[in-house]
């Protein structure tokens, strides 16, 4: 019975032309060999499984080949090539620095450097995982690495270049290996599948390529595993089942629930995913990637960023047409925030469920913002200004409950003339532009409101005749509701711990007509809360659905007992308790700061 060899070894490249994903690097090495301009030391660095050791072996075999091919490859026929292929060459020595990392191991290597090659021109030393050498071993290796004999070439390989001391790096030519692309990995897996007589779906190979994270060795190992599991017929379902990968159909299904605003369906999908043994953070990470893929699918120019199979790419395109950019930005922001807060959350599942609920309610939130909190589109019609300048009327936004201001996009003399004419006009007519808002009962068609305009000296020209009130939302709430919203705001400012602690310590009290009173101990906390007052008020009004809420922040009256907050307060307190501290500072020439 023939011995089985895993694909990672069986299909290991034997010449530069078989190396996948490193074309620029292998061409550079071939050119150096053809021009006979070889350095005495090379450093191959990059992620695992991308061909560092393989290229080092091919390079060592090629420079000793006695009859290279016209394109600069090893012939695999001469005695030097055959001895290397049969693993009996004494010209190429490999050292594993992970287990041979002492000074004595380096001294033993230096002793072997003195022996010239038996066949060929060079003796090549390949030191794998060189970052594992101790500092003393690195220092013992410096002199030999800098000035080796003419017949010696060192090739160092590592996955962690930053751990190598700078004196070693400066003595080597450094080659950075790249991760394998999805397309390159799938192409190589297809070649292996065809060579082995294995049927493999493109979607399945794409899943393996993404799971391997750019490492060809990992991809081939997973390929062998799934081929054994599926009996030589690699399908998409068998692949995700064997690799314990969450099916992309789950993400398509839950995104459909988002678009419908179906909260129960989204929660049931999450429950099913957790029941199948998947971690909730793994699901959130996958959801972020799914939303990102939907976003790049909306523009033909970004479709190449979609690293999936053709069938999955078609599904992404279909669902992307149903999603607005605004929805995708909003959902991505929530998913990313959930991922960042997952580790610090005490109730991780609840955090994920709340995120899903918020995404589901996007359409309701958008509608609510446009009807209650969103700006009203009003048309200011300065009749005199329009007549004087011939300038078309400009539409400007005005917040609910505030006096609208005029803005124009024109410049120069036209703007000045329009403003002068506007201030000369004693009144303006405000017409509603928001067709979706219903007028109060009994309001005649074309109803307008007249407001007063003040001169630049602040004196009114005409008393206000009628001010049209914006509709307000007044939803009663309990003290528990208020505390939940108040503490809920602190979750939106995790990078401001002082403000978070202040809000948790200083809770609001409910006054008359939904006015909130917050009392803080000192002026510093008063300033911090006042800086965020507008944001806090907007958050509470939106969360509690009550536009009458107002906030008053006051500082507590000073008590007989002084409170210590700042380092300066602590210092003054200590000096007051023990005046000898001042004398001690004078004796030692210290300065109190």
Image (tube, rainbow, N blue to C red):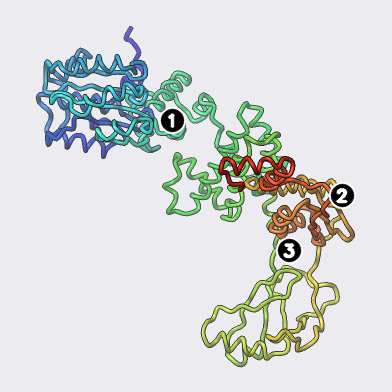
Q: Residue furthest left?
A: 67
* Position of residue 490 measured from the top left corner of the image (x, y, whole percent): 71, 47
Q: State whether residue 106 appears in this view.
A: yes
* Position of residue 170 measured from the top left corner of the image (x, y, whole percent): 27, 35
Residue displayed at 68% across by 39% down = 351
Label placed on residue 212:
1
Q: CA distance from mark 1 to mark 3?
A: 49 Å
Disc 2 packing (10 Å; few <14; some 14–19; many ≥20): few
Q: Is residue 273 left or right of residue 78?
A: right
Q: Mark 3 — residue?
A: 371
* Position of residue 339 measured from the top left corner of the image (x, y, whole percent): 60, 39
How many numbered marks have been drawn onto this rendered protein structure?
3
Q: Quadrant of residue 368?
A: bottom right
* Position of residue 95 measured from the top left corner of the image (x, y, whole percent): 29, 18
| Image quadrant occupied by the N terminus | top left
Figure check: 145 above or below 588: above
């Amino acid at each position: 019975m023939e011995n089985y060899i895993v694909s990672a070894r069986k299909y290991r490249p034997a010449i530069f032309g078989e190396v996948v994903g490193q074309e620029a690097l292998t061409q550079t090495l071939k050119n150096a060999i053809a021009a006979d301009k070889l350095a005495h030391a090379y450093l191959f660095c990059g992620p695992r499984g991308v061909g560092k050791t393989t290229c080092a072996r091919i390079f060592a075999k090629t420079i000793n080949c006695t009859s290279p091919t016209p394109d600069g490859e090893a012939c695999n026929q001469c005695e030097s090539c055959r001895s290397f292929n049969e693993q009996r060459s004494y010209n190429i020595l490999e050292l594993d620095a992970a287990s041979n990392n002492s000074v004595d191991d380096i001294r033993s290597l230096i002793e072997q450097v003195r022996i010239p090659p038996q066949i060929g021109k060079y003796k090549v030393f390949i030191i794998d995982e060189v970052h594992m050498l101790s500092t003393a071993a690195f220092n013992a290796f410096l002199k030999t690495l800098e000035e080796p004999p003419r017949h010696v070439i060192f090739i160092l390989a590592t996955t962690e270049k930053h751990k190598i001391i700078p004196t070693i790096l400066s003595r080597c030519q450094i080659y950075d290996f790249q991760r394998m692309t999805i397309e390159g990995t799938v192409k190589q897996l297809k070649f292996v599948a065809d060579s082995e007589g294995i049927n493999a779906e493109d979607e399945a190979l794409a899943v393996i390529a993404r799971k391997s994270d750019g490492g060809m060795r990992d991809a081939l190992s997973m390929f062998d595993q799934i081929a054994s599991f599926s009996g030589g017929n690699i399908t998409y379902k068998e692949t995700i089942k064997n690799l314990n990968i969450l099916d992309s159909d789950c993400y398509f299904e839950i995104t459909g629930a988002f678009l419908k605003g179906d909260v129960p369906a989204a929660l049931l999908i999450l429950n099913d995913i957790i029941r199948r043994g998947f971690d909730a953070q793994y699901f959130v990470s996958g959801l972020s990637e799914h939303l990102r893929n939907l976003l790049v699918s909306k523009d033909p120019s970004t479709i190449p960023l979609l690293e999936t199979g053709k069938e999955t790419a078609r599904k992404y395109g279909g669902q992307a047409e149903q999603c607005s950019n605004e929805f995708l930005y909003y959902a991505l922001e929530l998913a990313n925030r959930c991922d960042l807060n997952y580790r610090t959350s005490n109730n991780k599942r609840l955090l994920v469920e709340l995120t899903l609920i918020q995404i589901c309610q996007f359409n309701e939130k958008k509608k609510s913002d446009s009807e209650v909190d969103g700006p009203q589109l009003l048309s200011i019609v300065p009749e005199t200004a329009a007549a004087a300048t011939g300038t078309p009327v400009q539409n400007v936004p005005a917040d609910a409950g505030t006096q609208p201001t005029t803005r124009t996009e024109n410049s120069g003399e036209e703007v000045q003339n329009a403003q002068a004419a506007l201030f000369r006009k004693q009144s303006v007519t405000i017409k509603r532009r928001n067709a979706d808002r219903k007028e109060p009962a009994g309001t005649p068609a074309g109803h307008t409101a007249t407001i007063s305009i003040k001169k630049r000296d602040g004196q009114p020209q005409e008393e206000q005749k009628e001010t049209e009130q914006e509709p307000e939302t007044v939803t009663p709430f309990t003290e528990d509701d208020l505390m939940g919203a108040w503490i809920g705001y602190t979750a939106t400012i995790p990078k401001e711990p002082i403000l978070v602690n202040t809000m948790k310590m200083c809770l609001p009290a409910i006054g008359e007509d939904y006015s909130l009173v917050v009392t803080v101990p000192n002026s510093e906390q008063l300033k911090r809360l006042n800086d965020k007052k507008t944001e806090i008020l907007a958050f509470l009004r939106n969360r509690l659905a009550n536009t009458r809420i107002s906030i008053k922040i006051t500082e507590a009256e000073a008590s007989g007992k002084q409170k210590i907050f700042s380092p300066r307060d602590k210092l003054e307190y200590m000096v007051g308790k023990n005046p000898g501290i001042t004398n001690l500072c004078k004796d030692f020439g210290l300065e109190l700061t």
